[in-house]
């Protein structure tokens, strides 16, 4: 009797599951046709959380598991940092039967570690595909940073798909069905804002590095290191760039961003301490900042060894503590009269606001848009720009303090002159004048910084412009895919070559910006060096050899002869050999460049030539470097030793060589550097050095 009572219930349950399965087969969640190139599946997904991590495809595909799948209510489901395995189910019906349109199923989240896709066949078996960041690039079905799989051949009946996802990173499931061309366009458009963000970071780093070199203020150094480490954390963690250029680096691409985040936290705290003078303004809170620095320093190496989730918990805890602390301290310091603290507070608040809004966007509480997809990037960029403004405001504060100190010094000096003898007053005035000259040099930093920013702006504009052109060429590539048959894709090769050429241009102008900074560093560096007695003729021969090796190596593209007229038996001269060698090499290279420009004109009978001579004169030695090149135009001869002034074409020089050489000869060796030039006839530079110069600092 018991068996008979149970049988109707079993039959009813069986019929219920049959009806559920039939409804799934009859009503697909996604219909793929030729009306568009991509289909978002988010709201058509059914998701099952497997906390035991033990369920297999044979389990979840059984009818009794159907009620455990819950329909997604958002376009891109997010489940946080979960230990569970997530099973996703949906069905699709492919109405587009065109052979030239190959459809892909793509999971648009590069860091996911395991993505296994099961396409159910009509006989109930499964076509299994393996993917995820742990799968090597060569073994992926589609070689792409996103996890993409080809849809099976078109079937007149709906196809049910199961996806198993497991990861130690953020569990986010943005699923789309799209064409190959649309995947390329989406991937390219995803990277454009991040390249612009990288350009902003590069400009901040270059500009503030130059300021640190000249001002020697540690706040600039801490800011630069913070931008480098935290900016790379944002790029690797949120943009997926790491998976684009290191496709097989899945395991360590999860750990490295966390270590970079800890380093970024360490240096932003050091920056706050230095910028806000917390050791003097808020000594009690400053101890908490020092403790935070120590904890971040310990957490950095631990990120390489502890489990990922433990590292994420440590990072989130440190972010919460430092976020609150760095919101309170600027308010206190600002209320105590330090005005630049308001820029720090505004910058840090923008980042904190972006971090708070990200979970709201992930949960679907905010509408999905370009802004919500790039909240962290935009908040970070705004924060770094406001921090840079804070540092600029700090320069103005320093200038005002120096002007006040100068006024006080002058007032004190006037009072003192009334009470001392005239001779002592004159000596004191001369000493104060030298001090004022140094103060004026510091004040002129603003003009120099503006020149640096102007020179850096053009290469960085190229970075941004060529990044945008990558997007345009991607669009052209998409048009080619749509318009050409499958077997006629030669145009795609040409467009790919254009993309590669554009990338080279980006690298070229990036190197130019790097060269500008290196030249500035050379110009600003203070290297006392060791003075020694040197044989000038031998020193000149050594550097002529360097230049001749370059011409033989075709660096200059032509052959040039260098004639020597070196006076034998010159006495040894006390010089700094490394610095004087730099001057000789710069003047020789300029001479070779000048005769090279004249050679390009194709004048009949023209032979490029450079002549170097030495001559002893009344306790001094004279070095002449003469060329028969293009000469210096009369209109610019008065500016030839100015910093950043050059007659060369863009990319060939930035105008610091002659300025640096003039300073070395006149200030470091108590000599002179003069020139005589005739346009289209040649130039002669004359260096005069005393045999026993006074020691200069």
Image (cartoon, grey):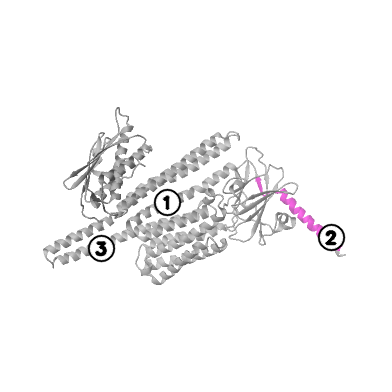
Q: Are marks 2 and 1 in contact (CB under 8 Å)?
A: no
- 421 sits left or right of 228 in the view: left
**Quadrant holding the C terminus:** bottom left
List x then y, in percent, for residue 202.
Answer: 42, 51
Image location (x, y in percent) of residue 222: 40, 60
Residue 7, disc: 2
Q: How packed is label 3: few (under 14 Cα within 10 Å), some, or many (20 or more)?
A: few
Tag 1 residue = 202
**Judging from the image, what secondary structure is the residue with disc 3 in?**
helix
The residue positioned farthest toward the front in the image shown? 569
| Magenta residue check for 596 | no
Report the span colored magenta: 3-31
Q: Which of the two labelled residues, at mark 2 and mark 1, occupies the earlier sequence position?
A: 2
Residue 403 percent coordinates (x, y): 25, 61
**Which mark, by number, is residue 404?**
3
Q: Secondary structure at mark 1?
A: helix
Asked whether, in this view, residue 245 is left or right of residue 561, the answer is: right
Residue found at the very far bottom of the displayed protein: 284
Front-lying residue, 677 or 333: 677
Whether residue 352 is visible, yes or no, is no
Is label 2 in contact with label 3 (beta carbons under 8 Å)?
A: no
């Amino acid at each position: 009797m018991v068996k008979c009572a149970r049988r109707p219930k079993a039959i009813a349950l069986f019929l219920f599951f049959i009806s559920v399965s039939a409804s799934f087969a009859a009503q697909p969640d996604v219909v793929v046709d030729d009306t568009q190139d991509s289909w978002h599946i988010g709201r058509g997904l059914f998701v099952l959380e497997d906390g035991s991590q033990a369920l297999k495809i044979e389990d979840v595909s059984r009818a009794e598991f159907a009620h455990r799948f819950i329909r997604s209510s958002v376009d891109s489901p997010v489940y946080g940092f979960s230990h569970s395995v997530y099973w996703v189910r949906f069905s699709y019906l492919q109405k587009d039967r065109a052979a030239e349109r190959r459809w892909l199923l793509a999971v648009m989240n590069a860091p996911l570690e395991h993505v296994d896709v099961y396409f159910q066949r009509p006989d109930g078996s499964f076509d299994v595909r393996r993917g995820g960041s742990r799968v090597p690039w060569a073994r992926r079905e589609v070689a792409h940073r996103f996890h993409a799989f080809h849809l099976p051949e078109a079937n007149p009946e709906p196809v049910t798909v199961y996806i198993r996802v497991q990861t130690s990173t953020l569990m986010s499931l943005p699923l789309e069905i799209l064409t190959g061309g649309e995947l390329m366009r989406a991937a390219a458009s995803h990277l454009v804002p991040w390249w612009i963000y990288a350009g902003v970071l590069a400009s901040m780093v270059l500009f503030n590095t130059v300021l640190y070199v000249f001002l020697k203020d540690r706040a600039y150094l801490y800011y630069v290191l913070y931008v480098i480490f935290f900016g790379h954390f944002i790029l690797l963690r949120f943009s997926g760039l790491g998976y684009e250029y290191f496709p097989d680096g899945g395991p360590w691409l999860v750990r490295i961003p966390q270590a970079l985040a800890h380093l970024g936290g360490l240096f932003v705290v050091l920056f706050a301490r230095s910028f806000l003078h917390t050791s003097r303004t808020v000594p009690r809170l400053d101890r908490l900042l020092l403790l935070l620095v120590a904890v971040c320093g310990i957490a950095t190496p631990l990120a390489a060894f502890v489990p990922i989730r433990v590292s994420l918990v440590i990072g989130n805890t440190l972010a919460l503590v430092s976020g609150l602390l760095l919101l309170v301290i600027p308010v206190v310091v600002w209320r105590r009269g330090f005005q630049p603290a308001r820029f720090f507070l505004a910058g840090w608040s923008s980042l904190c606001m972006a971090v708070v809004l990200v979970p709201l966007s992930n949960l679907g509480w905010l509408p999905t848009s370009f802004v919500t997809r790039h909240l962290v990037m935009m908040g970070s960029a705004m924060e770094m720009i406001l921090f840079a403004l804070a540092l600029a405001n700090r320069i103005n504060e320093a200038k005002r303090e120096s002007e006040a100190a100068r006024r006080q010094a002058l007032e004190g000096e006037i009072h003192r002159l009334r009470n001392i003898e005239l001779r002592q007053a004159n000596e004191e005035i001369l000493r104060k004048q030298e001090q004022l000259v140094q103060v004026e040099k510091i004040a002129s930093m603003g003009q120099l910084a503006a020149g640096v920013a102007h020179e850096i702006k053009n290469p960085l504009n190229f970075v941004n412009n060529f990044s945008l052109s990558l997007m345009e060429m991607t669009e052209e590539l998409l048009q080619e895919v749509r318009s050409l048959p499958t077997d006629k894709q030669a145009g795609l090769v040409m467009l790919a070559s254009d993309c590669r050429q554009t990338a080279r241009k980006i690298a070229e102008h990036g190197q130019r910006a790097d060269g500008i900074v290196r030249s500035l560093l050379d110009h600003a560096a203070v290297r006392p060096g060791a003075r020694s007695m040197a044989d000038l003729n031998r020193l000149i021969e050594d550097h002529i050899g360097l230049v001749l090796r370059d011409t033989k190596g075709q660096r200059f593209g032509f052959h040039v002869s260098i004639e020597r007229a070196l006076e034998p038996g010159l006495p040894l001269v006390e010089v700094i050999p490394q610095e004087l060698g730099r001057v000789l090499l710069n003047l020789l290279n300029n001479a070779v460049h000048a005769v090279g420009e004249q050679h390009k004109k194709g004048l009949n009978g023209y032979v490029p030539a450079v002549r170097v001579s030495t001559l002893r004169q009344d306790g001094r030695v004279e070095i002449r470097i003469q060329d028969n090149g293009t000469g210096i135009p009369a209109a610019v001869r008065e500016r030839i030793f100015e910093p950043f002034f050059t007659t060369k074409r863009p990319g060939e020089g930035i105008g610091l060589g002659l300025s640096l050489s003039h300073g070395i000869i006149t200030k470091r060796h108590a000599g002179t550097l003069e020139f005589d030039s005739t346009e289209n006839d040649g130039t002669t530079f004359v260096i005069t050095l005393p045999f026993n110069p006074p020691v200069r600092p």
